[in-house]
């Protein structure tokens, strides 16, 4: 299995493992955040510093929040569309891109409380994934973070989660 050292990137946090949690609030309090998926609620947790790459089925995702200025609710469709348009510049997304709405939680340091919000996860399927792909998603996350005035925006790389 190929790996990329996460220290090559300027992540605020990098979490290479994940675990099932009982609910979104507990996941945020215990682990800093959690996301509801079809099969369960998961929190990403510390592991090692490596992004594990799969032989020919990799996923890279960005989590688009539904809040501005940390916790003011908005309709995030403008930012979802903007993100998809951005990714179209680099990838043929016709069959490789999917997105879905779900719920996520995170602990806001500035507000000192758990924020539970709707999120849209945009996922790109790639046969091979490399540092350039990660940098494209980092740039996108930084744009979303700045425009939406967020403390951080998450990207997932296979089973790992990075906060930008």
Image (cartoon, rainbow, N blue to C red):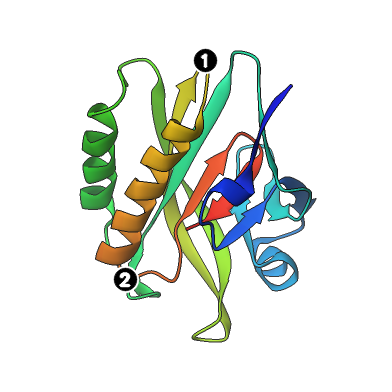
Q: Position of residue 125 (x, y in %)?
A: 48, 23
Locate residue 136 relative to residue 37 in the image: left or right: left
Identify the element where label 2 is drawn.
Answer: loop
- How many neighbours does mark 2 have within 10 angstroms: few (below 14), some (14-19), or many (20 or more)? some
Badge 1 crowding class, 10 Å Cα cut-off, few under 14, some 14 to 19, many 20 or more, is: few
In this figure, what is the number of numbered marks?
A: 2
Estimate the spatial distance between the alpha carbons at disc 1 and disc 2, rounded to whole Å.
33 Å
Q: Position of residue 141 (x, y in %)?
A: 38, 52
Mark identifier at residue 157: none
Q: Nearer the viewer, residue 63 or 26?
A: 63
Residue visible at 30% across and 18% down?
92
Instruction: Label 1, secondary structure: give it.
Output: loop
**Coordinates of residue 46 in the picture (x, y in percent):** 76, 55
**Which of these two is toward me, 94 or 41?**
94
**Residue drawn at 36 percent across, 60 percent down:** 66
Q: Nearer the viewer, residue 66 or 125?
A: 125
Which residue has dot 1 on it? 127
Location of residue 28 (image quadrant): bottom right
Residue with the most extreme front position = 8
Choose top left, top right, bottom left or bottom right for residue 43.
bottom right
Residue drawn at (21%, 35%) of the image: 85
Tag 1 and tag 2, C-beta contact below 8 Å:
no
Q: Quadrant of the N terminus?
A: top right
The mark lying in front, picked from 1 and 2, is 1
**As drawn, 35 above or below 134:** below
- Give the mark nearer the N terminus: 1 vs 2: 1
Closer-to-camera residue (91/76)? 91
- Identify the residue position indicated by label 2 in the image: 149
Indicate the position of residue 137 as horizontal and vertical percent values.
40, 42
Above or below 95: residue 8: below
């Amino acid at each position: 299995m190929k790996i990329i050292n996460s220290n090559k990137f300027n992540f605020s946090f990098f979490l290479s493992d994940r675990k099932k949690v009982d609910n979104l609030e507990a996941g945020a309090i215990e682990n800093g955040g959690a996301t509801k998926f079809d099969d369960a609620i998961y929190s990403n947790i510390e592991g090692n510093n490596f992004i594990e790459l799969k032989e020919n089925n990799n996923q890279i995702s960005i989590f688009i929040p539904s809040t501005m200025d940390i916790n003011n609710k908005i309709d995030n469709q403008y930012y979802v569309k903007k993100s998809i348009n951005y990714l179209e510049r680099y990838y043929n997304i016709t069959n490789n891109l999917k997105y879905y709405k779900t719920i996520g939680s995170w602990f806001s340091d500035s507000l000192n409380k758990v924020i539970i919000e709707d999120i849209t996860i945009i996922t790109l399927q790639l046969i091979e994934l490399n540092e350039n792909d990660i940098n494209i998603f980092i740039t996108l996350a930084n744009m979303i973070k700045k425009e939406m005035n967020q403390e951080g925006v998450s990207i997932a790389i296979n089973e790992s989660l990075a906060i930008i």
